[in-house]
Amino acid sequence: MTVYKINDNLHVFQTICTCPDEVATQLGDFNYFEKILLQGVENKSLKGIWKPAVVEFEDVLTKNSELPDISLWLRTYLVLSPRAYEILNTYLSEGGEFLPVNYQGEKWYLYTSLTFGKEDRQKCIEKISYGSPDGLEVLVFIDDDVKDKVIFKSRLEGAGNLYCTEKFKVICEQNQLNGLVFSSNLTESFN
């Protein structure tokens, strides 16, 4: 079974430029900043503090880039256009939560995964730099654990990225949902 690391396609598409501190302020409490940043690791629901925040997009690597159907925010949140939400919400709802945001008067969603994939620790290889742990050289998930999951995180990797199965990739491709790049190299740096 192939598992993919989800990355932004920043060469073609815009990304959210609204910072977590700005979102926290819009939610009414600057201290929510930490909850937003640590959600991936702490894996706690944000629904109790959430209300629709206004977000903005900007070009990153290319001028006049396109608005994506799906992108990433803080590497652990999917950003879903209204069209992407309509297509994906039934597939993703069991494994996480949707947090509404507003972009130019339209309701978009942040999706945060509340699901972890179980790693095959016998096949994972830790990266050591100058005698200290420095991430992973190889990350492998247990097929039986992730086969029915759509999007998930890795505890071993530090919950700093999102991963998906072929199912999510195919749904995006069949529905021509643009904005993401899927890499079978689970430990590569940003594209």
Image (cartoon, rainbow, N blue to C red):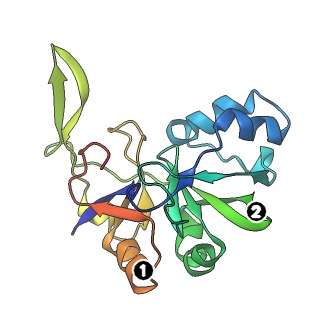
The answer to whether residue 114 is visible is no
Q: Which mark is residue 171?
A: 1
Considering only order in the chain, which callout, 2 or 1, is on the residue closer to the N terminus? 2
Q: Answer left or right for 120 relative to 77.
A: left
Q: In this rendered view, identify the residue nearer to me: 82 or 32.
A: 82
Q: Answer left or right for 1 relative to 28.
A: left
Residue 106 higher or lower than 157, as above or below: below
* Residue 97: % across, % down: 63, 59
* Residue 135: % across, % down: 26, 31
Q: Which residue of the protein is positioned furthest toward the right in this rendering?
A: 28
Q: Answer left or right for 83 relative to 59.
A: right
Q: In this rendered view, identify the residue nearer to me: 120 or 179.
A: 179
The mark lying in front, picked from 1 and 2, is 2
Q: Residue at the location (54% across, 70% down)?
A: 69
Dot 1: few (<14), some (14–19), or many (≥20) neighbours within 10 Å? some
The answer to whether residue 158 is visible is yes
Quarter of the image where the N terminus is located: bottom left
Dot 2: few (<14), some (14–19), or many (≥20) neighbours within 10 Å? few
Q: Which residue of the protein is positioned furthest toward the front in this rendering?
A: 63
Q: Residue at the location (37% across, 46% down)?
A: 154
Residue located beneath label 2 in the image? 104
* Residue 180: % across, % down: 41, 63
Q: Label 1 to label 2, Cα distance in Å?
A: 26 Å
Q: Please say if the residues under marks 1 and 2 sit with CB atoms less than 8 Å apart.
A: no
Q: Secondary structure at mark 2?
A: loop
Q: Secondary structure at mark 1?
A: helix
When asked about the image quadrant of residue 142, the answer is bottom left
* Residue 22: % across, % down: 73, 37
